[in-house]
Amino acid sequence: NQGTPASMNVGNRSMRMNNNDLSWGLGTLVWTTQVHNYAPRLYQCHSNAADRQALFEPYVQYIQWLCRKWEQHWNVIGIELLNEPVLGGMPNLKRFLSCRRDLFDFYANVMDSLGKSDPPIRAPLALEDGFGSLGSGSNFMKVLSMIPISSFAKEKLKEWGEKNQLILSIHWYPSGGTLGHLAKVTVEQYVAMGKKESAELMASSPIWVSEFCMLLPEHTAKYLAEFTNAGSPCTTYWQYTDTQYTQSFGWYKYPPEVKQYGDPVDVLGIVNEKAWAAYEPTVADGTYWGAQITGSGGGQTGVLSKVK
Protein backbone atom coordinates (compact mmCIF):
# COMPACT_ATOMS: atom_id res chain seq x y z
CA ASN A 1 0.00 0.00 0.00
CA GLN A 2 3.00 2.30 -0.25
CA GLY A 3 3.52 4.70 -3.14
CA THR A 4 1.08 6.62 -5.30
CA PRO A 5 -2.61 5.60 -5.15
CA ALA A 6 -2.65 5.87 -8.95
CA SER A 7 -0.73 2.59 -9.03
CA MET A 8 -3.04 0.64 -6.72
CA ASN A 9 -4.52 -1.26 -9.65
CA VAL A 10 -1.20 -3.06 -10.09
CA GLY A 11 0.35 -2.81 -6.60
CA ASN A 12 -2.54 -3.50 -4.22
CA ARG A 13 -3.16 -7.19 -3.49
CA SER A 14 -6.88 -6.73 -2.94
CA MET A 15 -7.31 -5.04 -6.30
CA ARG A 16 -5.26 -7.71 -8.02
CA MET A 17 -7.74 -10.29 -6.68
CA ASN A 18 -10.44 -8.49 -8.65
CA ASN A 19 -8.71 -7.31 -11.82
CA ASN A 20 -6.83 -10.45 -12.88
CA ASP A 21 -7.69 -11.88 -16.27
CA LEU A 22 -10.14 -14.49 -14.93
CA SER A 23 -12.09 -11.92 -12.93
CA TRP A 24 -12.07 -9.55 -15.88
CA GLY A 25 -13.42 -12.21 -18.20
CA LEU A 26 -16.16 -13.13 -15.72
CA GLY A 27 -17.23 -9.51 -15.37
CA THR A 28 -16.31 -9.14 -11.69
CA LEU A 29 -15.48 -5.44 -12.01
CA VAL A 30 -18.40 -4.71 -14.33
CA TRP A 31 -20.90 -5.77 -11.69
CA THR A 32 -19.50 -3.76 -8.77
CA THR A 33 -21.66 -1.17 -7.03
CA GLN A 34 -19.13 1.53 -7.91
CA VAL A 35 -19.41 0.85 -11.64
CA HIS A 36 -23.19 0.68 -11.58
CA ASN A 37 -23.39 3.96 -9.69
CA TYR A 38 -20.91 5.74 -11.91
CA ALA A 39 -21.92 4.60 -15.41
CA PRO A 40 -25.38 6.26 -15.55
CA ARG A 41 -24.00 9.36 -13.84
CA LEU A 42 -21.25 9.67 -16.44
CA TYR A 43 -23.70 9.27 -19.32
CA GLN A 44 -25.95 11.98 -17.85
CA CYS A 45 -23.18 14.38 -16.80
CA HIS A 46 -24.04 16.81 -19.61
CA SER A 47 -27.43 17.51 -18.00
CA ASN A 48 -26.24 18.30 -14.46
CA ALA A 49 -24.54 21.65 -13.85
CA ALA A 50 -21.96 20.37 -11.37
CA ASP A 51 -21.17 17.18 -13.31
CA ARG A 52 -21.08 19.09 -16.59
CA GLN A 53 -18.32 21.31 -15.23
CA ALA A 54 -16.42 18.50 -13.50
CA LEU A 55 -16.81 15.72 -16.08
CA PHE A 56 -18.44 16.61 -19.37
CA GLU A 57 -16.61 19.79 -20.34
CA PRO A 58 -13.10 18.44 -19.55
CA TYR A 59 -13.98 15.26 -21.47
CA VAL A 60 -15.10 17.23 -24.53
CA GLN A 61 -11.94 19.35 -24.36
CA TYR A 62 -9.86 16.17 -24.34
CA ILE A 63 -11.73 14.76 -27.34
CA GLN A 64 -11.24 18.07 -29.16
CA TRP A 65 -7.51 17.83 -28.46
CA LEU A 66 -7.44 14.28 -29.84
CA CYS A 67 -9.35 15.39 -32.94
CA ARG A 68 -6.79 18.11 -33.59
CA LYS A 69 -4.04 15.52 -33.21
CA TRP A 70 -5.87 13.40 -35.80
CA GLU A 71 -5.45 16.25 -38.29
CA GLN A 72 -1.67 16.00 -37.90
CA HIS A 73 -1.34 12.25 -38.49
CA TRP A 74 -2.61 10.71 -41.73
CA ASN A 75 -2.37 7.17 -40.34
CA VAL A 76 -4.81 7.75 -37.45
CA ILE A 77 -8.23 6.56 -38.60
CA GLY A 78 -10.48 8.20 -36.00
CA ILE A 79 -11.21 8.90 -32.35
CA GLU A 80 -13.09 6.33 -30.27
CA LEU A 81 -15.16 7.99 -27.55
CA LEU A 82 -15.44 5.09 -25.09
CA ASN A 83 -14.14 1.54 -24.94
CA GLU A 84 -16.68 -1.12 -23.94
CA PRO A 85 -19.06 1.33 -22.24
CA VAL A 86 -20.70 -0.41 -19.29
CA LEU A 87 -24.47 -0.30 -19.00
CA GLY A 88 -25.07 0.22 -15.28
CA GLY A 89 -27.63 1.41 -12.78
CA MET A 90 -28.39 -1.71 -10.77
CA PRO A 91 -30.07 -2.40 -8.40
CA ASN A 92 -32.41 0.27 -9.80
CA LEU A 93 -33.99 -1.61 -12.69
CA LYS A 94 -35.32 1.54 -14.38
CA ARG A 95 -31.88 3.15 -14.40
CA PHE A 96 -30.36 -0.07 -15.70
CA LEU A 97 -32.82 -0.42 -18.56
CA SER A 98 -32.44 3.30 -19.43
CA CYS A 99 -28.65 3.25 -19.43
CA ARG A 100 -28.23 2.45 -23.13
CA ARG A 101 -30.48 5.41 -23.97
CA ASP A 102 -28.36 7.57 -21.64
CA LEU A 103 -25.18 6.33 -23.33
CA PHE A 104 -26.36 7.46 -26.75
CA ASP A 105 -27.55 10.79 -25.29
CA PHE A 106 -24.02 11.23 -23.97
CA TYR A 107 -22.60 10.54 -27.42
CA ALA A 108 -25.10 12.96 -28.96
CA ASN A 109 -24.19 15.77 -26.58
CA VAL A 110 -20.50 15.21 -27.23
CA MET A 111 -21.15 15.42 -30.97
CA ASP A 112 -23.29 18.52 -30.45
CA SER A 113 -20.47 20.23 -28.53
CA LEU A 114 -17.83 19.17 -31.05
CA GLY A 115 -20.04 20.48 -33.84
CA LYS A 116 -19.63 24.00 -32.46
CA SER A 117 -15.83 23.90 -32.73
CA ASP A 118 -14.06 26.52 -34.81
CA PRO A 119 -12.45 25.49 -37.08
CA PRO A 120 -14.81 22.52 -37.59
CA ILE A 121 -13.84 19.08 -36.35
CA ARG A 122 -13.06 16.82 -39.32
CA ALA A 123 -12.02 13.65 -37.49
CA PRO A 124 -14.33 10.62 -37.65
CA LEU A 125 -15.67 9.38 -34.30
CA ALA A 126 -15.86 5.67 -33.50
CA LEU A 127 -18.82 4.78 -31.26
CA GLU A 128 -19.51 1.54 -29.40
CA ASP A 129 -22.88 0.26 -28.24
CA GLY A 130 -23.20 -1.07 -24.70
CA PHE A 131 -20.27 -3.26 -23.61
CA GLY A 132 -18.88 -3.00 -27.15
CA SER A 133 -21.67 -5.31 -28.31
CA LEU A 134 -24.73 -4.53 -30.45
CA GLY A 135 -28.35 -3.86 -29.59
CA SER A 136 -29.24 -7.22 -31.16
CA GLY A 137 -26.01 -8.99 -30.24
CA SER A 138 -27.59 -11.25 -27.61
CA ASN A 139 -30.78 -11.75 -25.62
CA PHE A 140 -29.16 -9.76 -22.83
CA MET A 141 -28.49 -6.79 -25.10
CA LYS A 142 -31.97 -7.05 -26.60
CA VAL A 143 -33.42 -6.55 -23.11
CA LEU A 144 -31.17 -3.54 -22.52
CA SER A 145 -32.32 -2.12 -25.86
CA MET A 146 -36.03 -2.24 -25.10
CA ILE A 147 -36.07 1.48 -24.27
CA PRO A 148 -35.30 3.25 -27.58
CA ILE A 149 -32.66 5.93 -27.84
CA SER A 150 -33.88 9.53 -27.94
CA SER A 151 -34.85 11.47 -31.05
CA PHE A 152 -32.05 13.93 -30.26
CA ALA A 153 -29.49 11.11 -30.29
CA LYS A 154 -30.91 9.70 -33.53
CA GLU A 155 -30.69 13.16 -35.11
CA LYS A 156 -27.03 13.63 -34.17
CA LEU A 157 -26.06 10.12 -35.24
CA LYS A 158 -27.71 10.63 -38.61
CA GLU A 159 -26.11 14.06 -39.02
CA TRP A 160 -22.58 12.86 -38.32
CA GLY A 161 -23.12 9.67 -40.30
CA GLU A 162 -24.22 11.60 -43.38
CA LYS A 163 -21.09 13.75 -43.28
CA ASN A 164 -18.93 10.58 -43.13
CA GLN A 165 -17.67 11.17 -39.61
CA LEU A 166 -18.94 8.09 -37.79
CA ILE A 167 -17.70 4.52 -37.42
CA LEU A 168 -19.60 1.78 -35.58
CA SER A 169 -16.99 0.00 -33.49
CA ILE A 170 -17.91 -3.52 -32.35
CA HIS A 171 -16.22 -6.19 -30.25
CA TRP A 172 -16.77 -9.90 -30.87
CA TYR A 173 -16.74 -12.17 -27.84
CA PRO A 174 -19.31 -14.89 -28.53
CA SER A 175 -18.45 -16.93 -25.44
CA GLY A 176 -20.04 -14.49 -22.98
CA GLY A 177 -18.29 -12.64 -20.17
CA THR A 178 -18.37 -8.92 -19.60
CA LEU A 179 -19.53 -7.78 -23.01
CA GLY A 180 -23.08 -9.04 -23.01
CA HIS A 181 -22.53 -11.59 -25.81
CA LEU A 182 -24.46 -14.31 -24.05
CA ALA A 183 -25.48 -16.19 -27.19
CA LYS A 184 -23.34 -17.84 -29.84
CA VAL A 185 -23.03 -15.50 -32.80
CA THR A 186 -21.15 -16.42 -35.97
CA VAL A 187 -18.81 -14.05 -37.78
CA GLU A 188 -21.23 -13.63 -40.68
CA GLN A 189 -24.20 -13.00 -38.37
CA TYR A 190 -22.32 -10.45 -36.32
CA VAL A 191 -21.08 -8.47 -39.29
CA ALA A 192 -24.63 -8.43 -40.68
CA MET A 193 -25.97 -7.26 -37.30
CA GLY A 194 -23.41 -4.46 -37.22
CA LYS A 195 -24.30 -3.27 -40.71
CA LYS A 196 -28.00 -3.35 -39.81
CA GLU A 197 -27.50 -1.27 -36.67
CA SER A 198 -25.34 1.19 -38.57
CA ALA A 199 -28.00 1.53 -41.26
CA GLU A 200 -30.69 2.15 -38.66
CA LEU A 201 -28.78 4.61 -36.49
CA MET A 202 -25.75 5.99 -38.32
CA ALA A 203 -26.74 6.44 -41.97
CA SER A 204 -24.87 3.23 -42.89
CA SER A 205 -21.53 4.38 -41.53
CA PRO A 206 -18.76 1.80 -41.88
CA ILE A 207 -18.40 -0.84 -39.20
CA TRP A 208 -15.10 -1.69 -37.55
CA VAL A 209 -14.59 -5.02 -35.80
CA SER A 210 -12.21 -3.39 -33.38
CA GLU A 211 -11.56 -6.26 -30.99
CA PHE A 212 -11.64 -10.03 -30.76
CA CYS A 213 -9.28 -12.44 -29.07
CA MET A 214 -8.01 -15.91 -29.93
CA LEU A 215 -5.40 -17.85 -27.99
CA LEU A 216 -3.20 -18.84 -30.93
CA PRO A 217 -1.81 -16.62 -33.75
CA GLU A 218 -3.04 -19.14 -36.33
CA HIS A 219 -6.60 -18.80 -35.07
CA THR A 220 -6.35 -15.01 -34.89
CA ALA A 221 -5.17 -14.94 -38.53
CA LYS A 222 -8.04 -17.25 -39.54
CA TYR A 223 -10.64 -14.93 -38.02
CA LEU A 224 -9.06 -11.81 -39.50
CA ALA A 225 -9.64 -13.38 -42.89
CA GLU A 226 -13.17 -14.52 -41.99
CA PHE A 227 -14.25 -11.06 -40.85
CA THR A 228 -12.84 -9.54 -44.02
CA ASN A 229 -14.61 -12.09 -46.20
CA ALA A 230 -17.84 -11.48 -44.27
CA GLY A 231 -17.76 -7.80 -45.23
CA SER A 232 -15.95 -6.04 -42.40
CA PRO A 233 -13.95 -3.21 -44.00
CA CYS A 234 -11.61 -3.00 -41.00
CA THR A 235 -10.77 -5.61 -38.36
CA THR A 236 -8.26 -5.49 -35.51
CA TYR A 237 -7.47 -8.13 -32.91
CA TRP A 238 -6.55 -8.14 -29.24
CA GLN A 239 -3.63 -7.72 -29.29
CA TYR A 240 -0.30 -7.20 -31.05
CA THR A 241 2.62 -7.45 -28.63
CA ASP A 242 6.35 -7.53 -29.25
CA THR A 243 6.66 -10.64 -27.10
CA GLN A 244 10.40 -10.87 -27.71
CA TYR A 245 10.81 -7.46 -26.07
CA THR A 246 8.34 -7.88 -23.21
CA GLN A 247 9.06 -11.57 -22.58
CA SER A 248 5.39 -11.80 -21.66
CA PHE A 249 1.99 -12.16 -23.30
CA GLY A 250 1.16 -8.45 -23.17
CA TRP A 251 2.51 -4.92 -22.89
CA TYR A 252 3.91 -5.48 -19.43
CA LYS A 253 7.46 -6.42 -18.52
CA TYR A 254 8.90 -7.80 -15.29
CA PRO A 255 12.56 -7.29 -14.28
CA PRO A 256 14.80 -10.35 -13.78
CA GLU A 257 14.54 -10.17 -9.99
CA VAL A 258 10.77 -10.68 -10.37
CA LYS A 259 10.79 -12.93 -13.45
CA GLN A 260 13.00 -15.52 -11.76
CA TYR A 261 10.06 -16.45 -9.56
CA GLY A 262 7.34 -16.20 -12.23
CA ASP A 263 4.41 -13.77 -12.51
CA PRO A 264 3.49 -11.90 -9.29
CA VAL A 265 -0.19 -12.74 -9.85
CA ASP A 266 -1.33 -15.30 -12.38
CA VAL A 267 -4.40 -15.21 -14.63
CA LEU A 268 -6.47 -16.89 -11.91
CA GLY A 269 -5.58 -14.25 -9.32
CA ILE A 270 -3.24 -16.52 -7.34
CA VAL A 271 -0.38 -14.58 -5.75
CA ASN A 272 3.17 -15.89 -6.15
CA GLU A 273 4.56 -14.74 -2.80
CA LYS A 274 8.24 -14.63 -3.81
CA ALA A 275 7.53 -12.81 -7.08
CA TRP A 276 5.14 -10.42 -5.32
CA ALA A 277 7.75 -9.57 -2.68
CA ALA A 278 10.15 -8.60 -5.49
CA TYR A 279 7.51 -6.79 -7.59
CA GLU A 280 5.77 -4.72 -4.89
CA PRO A 281 8.76 -2.40 -4.23
CA THR A 282 8.94 -1.53 -7.95
CA VAL A 283 5.36 -0.24 -7.75
CA ALA A 284 6.14 1.80 -4.65
CA ASP A 285 9.16 3.49 -6.27
CA GLY A 286 7.53 3.90 -9.70
CA THR A 287 9.95 1.73 -11.67
CA TYR A 288 7.43 -0.99 -12.59
CA TRP A 289 6.52 -1.63 -16.23
CA GLY A 290 2.86 -2.63 -16.16
CA ALA A 291 1.15 -5.81 -15.05
CA GLN A 292 -1.19 -8.49 -16.36
CA ILE A 293 -4.53 -6.98 -15.34
CA THR A 294 -7.97 -6.43 -16.90
CA GLY A 295 -7.46 -8.72 -19.85
CA SER A 296 -4.05 -7.35 -20.81
CA GLY A 297 -2.71 -10.79 -21.67
CA GLY A 298 -3.21 -12.64 -24.93
CA GLY A 299 -0.57 -10.69 -26.83
CA GLN A 300 0.71 -12.18 -30.10
CA THR A 301 3.22 -11.40 -32.79
CA GLY A 302 3.58 -12.55 -36.39
CA VAL A 303 -0.18 -12.82 -36.93
CA LEU A 304 -0.44 -11.04 -40.29
CA SER A 305 2.07 -13.38 -41.90
CA LYS A 306 -0.35 -16.22 -41.20
CA VAL A 307 -3.44 -14.67 -42.82
CA LYS A 308 -4.59 -16.65 -45.87
Image (cartoon, helix red, strand yellow):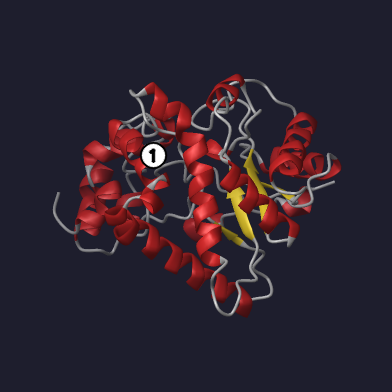
Residue under the point 57% across and 47% down: 152
Looking at the image, residue 30 lies above or below residue 253: above
Residue 51: give x, y in percent of width and height.
31, 53
Q: Residues within 10 Å of mark 1 (few under 14, many from 20)?
A: many
Residue under the point 41% across and 56% down: 253
Residue 279: give x, y in percent of width and height.
26, 51
Residue farthest toward the front in the current orientation of the protein? 151
Q: In which image quadrant can residue 104 be found? A: top right
Residue 2: give x, y in percent of width and height.
13, 54
Residue under the point 35% across and 33% down: 36
Residue marked by disc 1: 40
Name the residue type under label 1.
Pro
Q: Is residue 257 left or right of residue 145?
A: left
Secondary structure, mark 1, is helix
Looking at the image, residue 305 lies above or below residue 297: below
Q: Of 272 and 121, which appears nearest the observer? A: 121
Looking at the image, residue 279 lies above or below residue 199: below
Q: Total of numbered circles in the picture?
A: 1
Residue 249: give x, y in percent of width and height.
51, 47
Residue 248 in view here: yes
Q: Of 260 and 239, which appears nearest the observer? A: 239
Residue farthest toward the left in the current orientation of the protein? 2
Residue 271 in view here: no
